[in-house]
Image (tube, rainbow, N blue to C red):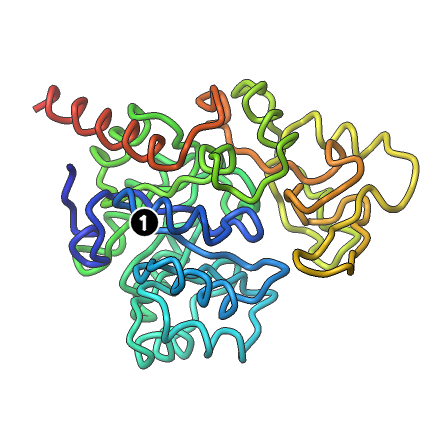
Amino acid sequence: MLETRFTRLVGCTVPIQLAGMGGVSVPALVAAVTAAGGLGMLGAAPASMPDRIDVLDAMGCSLRGANFLGPFLNPEEFEATIERVRLAEVFWREPDPALVEQIHAAGALAGWQVGSVDDARAAADAGCDIVVAQGVEAGGHVQGQIGLLPLLGAVVDAVGDDVVVVAAGGIGSARAMAAALAAGAQAVRIGTRFVASAESGAHPDYKAALVAAGADETVLSEEFGRTTGWPDAPNRVLRAALDEASAFDGDVVAQLHLPGSDASFPVARFDTLPPLAECEGNVSAMAQYAGQSVGDVRAVQPAAEIVRELAEGAEALLSAAR
C-alpha cells in the first residue's frame, strides 16, 4: 500500500482520511475506514463526540480523529475529545494558535481545513501539523472559491515541508486520488463516496440519490442553513434536493428520532442537517450534501471496499507513471 508522510505521522497504512460528516460519520463508519487502513473522523452530530468515542472504544477502534466546526465549537466537548483522538481538526474558523496549543497539550495532532492559501499559511504559522486544502468541488460546506488542483499546488508551496497537506474536494476515484498525490498531497480526504457506504449514518434514500446522480447534478448554494443559525455559509448539495426544498410547502420537512429514545425533533426546511437514517419525512427536501465526485458513486459499498478500490487503483496508476 501507499506510504506517505501522512500515514507515518498519523499511524495508518493508507493515505485516506474520512471526512468528518456529522451524523453521517457514525462510529461504525469511522471504525470500518480505520480497520481498512485509513483514518476515520467523527464530526459534529446530535450525539456527543465523547459518547461516540466510548462506542469506538467498545469496538476496539483506538485510531480515530475528530473534526470541529468553528462556529459551533463547544469548549467542554472539545476538551473532553482532544485527549482521546489522534487528530483534532478545525474548520470554518480563522486558524487559532491557542486552540492548536490546546490540542498539542492533550497529545493529539492539530489539523485545520482551509479554502485559501492565506488561511493555509496562517494554519502553518499557528503550529498545525496538518493542513487540509479544500477545493470548491467539495460536498458539504465549502469555504474557498477555487478548484482543488490550483489550490493544492499553492498550499503545498506555501506551507513548506514541515506541514502535511491533505487534498479534499471532488476526489471519488482512484484517478482523482492519484492526481492529488502526484500534485503534492500526502493524503486525500473523502466524503461523498463514504456517505454512500454501507456503514454510513445516511438515510437509505439519500444514498440512493447519490448513486443515481451525475457529476453535473450538484450546486453550490447558501440556502441550507439560512433558517437554522448558519447563514452565508456556501454548501454543495444535490440540485434535486435544493429544488425539492424550494418547492416544499411548509416549515418542517422531517422528524429526527433520537436512537434509544422516544424523543424526536423537527427538521426545518433549509436546515443544515443531512438526511440521517433516523429521519422520517420528506428527506428528499433535506440537505443532501454531495461533491462533484458524486458521479463516481455507482453503488452502496462497504467502506473497506471503497478504501481498497481507491488505494490499490491509485497505487497502480502512480506506479505506471514512474
Q: Nearer the viewer, residue 67 or 138?
A: 67
- Quarter of the picture containing the N terminus is top left
Locate the C terminus and report the quarter of the image it occupies.
top left
**Residue shown at 27%/29% (left/top)?**
179
Q: Residue 148 occupies which quadrant of the picture? A: top left
Q: Which residue is mark 1?
A: 34
Task: In the displayed orientation, state which residue is furthest to the left.
Answer: 322
Q: Residue 221's spot in the image, x, y percent?
A: 67, 38
Where is residue 91 shown, x and y percent of the image? 48, 58
Residue at figure coordinates x 64%, y 50% from the top left: 233
Percent of width and height locating residue 230: 69, 56
Residue at horizontal 50 percent and vertical 63 percent from the top? 52
Labels in figure, total: 1
Q: Is residue 35 left or right of residue 277?
A: left
Residue type at numbered disc 1: Thr
Against 81, is 269 above or below?
A: above
Residue 289 shown left or right of residue 315 in the figure:
right
The 10 Å Cα crowd at callout 1, few under 14, some 14 to 19, many 20 or more, is many
Q: Nearer the viewer, residue 231 or 146?
A: 231
Position above or below: 287 against 214:
below
- Left or right: 299 with respect to 36? right
Residue 238 lies, in percent from the top left, at 63, 29
SS at circle 1: helix
- For this rendering, which residue is in front, 277 or 132? 277
- Give the farthest residue toward the right: 249
Q: Which residue is found at the position 27% from the left and 32% from the top? A: 308
